[in-house]
Image (tube, rainbow, N blue to C red):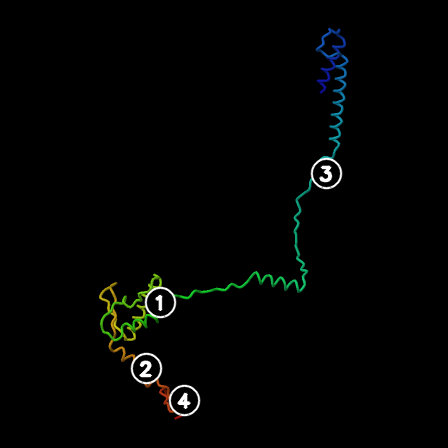
Amino acid sequence: DYLVMAAWLAYLKSKLLLPDMGGEDQPSGEEMAAVLAFQLRRLESVREAGNNLIQLNQLGRDFFARGAPEAFTVTLRAVLDASLHDLMRAYGDMKRRQAPKSMSIEPVKLYTVEKALERIWRMLGETPEWIELSSFLPDDIADPLVRRSAIASTFTASLELAREGKLNIRQDGVFSRIFLSANPNGNQSLADDEPENNPENVPGDGNDTVTAEDPDSSEAS
């Protein structure tokens, strides 16, 4: 700024000392003096503004920054303000939203062993001929799952009847067909199992004898 002012003063002095050549493009001495006065006033305003800024409070000299931040803990405490009527209504609303769901189980449509036992015994009868196991399966089964259960139940029923001695089972080889035939002695063994034909199974009267010896009675004798 000082260099510019010095140049303006030298130029203004030269214009005042040298005669006017009558050039219209160049400013006159009065105009240049007015411009110089404006620049001086502007420079003074800038200096005054700078001094005002310097006089302001500065960080680290007039005031200081805050230190480590403080940790605040927020504690929320719920205060219940409800009457008995409000509690009952809230409980009723909750129970309505949680309506019990009923569970329904579809009945099982599988072929049971009891049905297989009845069908085998009815079809086999007392015929001693060998009949293939698949012949005892029902013909009106379309569901594959029910048909597999019928095969398993029929095979289980045949094993149970063979264990009781009511029929005979034959299989000529591994994974070959299974044949069934009625056991002629099966009806007799079945009759022997009836309560009226077995005296051990008949309920006793007041004169029953004790088969197991009582150790206390033996010692007393």
Mark sitting on residue 63: 3
Tell me how far mark 4 sits from mark 3, CA to CA: 110 Å
Determine crowd level at label 1: few under 14, some 14-19, many 20+ residues with C-alpha closer than 10 A: many
Q: What x and y, as percent, mark residue 42?
A: 74, 22
On the rendered structure, is 55 left or right of 113?
Answer: right
Sequence-wise, the earlier of marks 4 and 2 is 2
Q: Identify which residue is drawn at 50% across, 64% down.
A: 102
What SS does tag 3 mark?
Answer: loop
Q: Which residue in the rendered view is the most extreme toward the bottom?
A: 221
Sequence-wise, the earlier of marks 2 and 3 is 3
* Residue type, mark 4 in image: Asp
Mark sitting on residue 216: 4
Mark sitting on residue 111: 1
Kindly check if marks 4 and 3 are in contact, taking CB atoms under 8 A apart as contact. Answer: no
Tell me how far mark 2 sits from mark 1, CA to CA: 28 Å
Kindly check if marks 2 and 3 are in contact, taking CB atoms under 8 A apart as contact. Answer: no
Residue on which the image places disc 2: 194
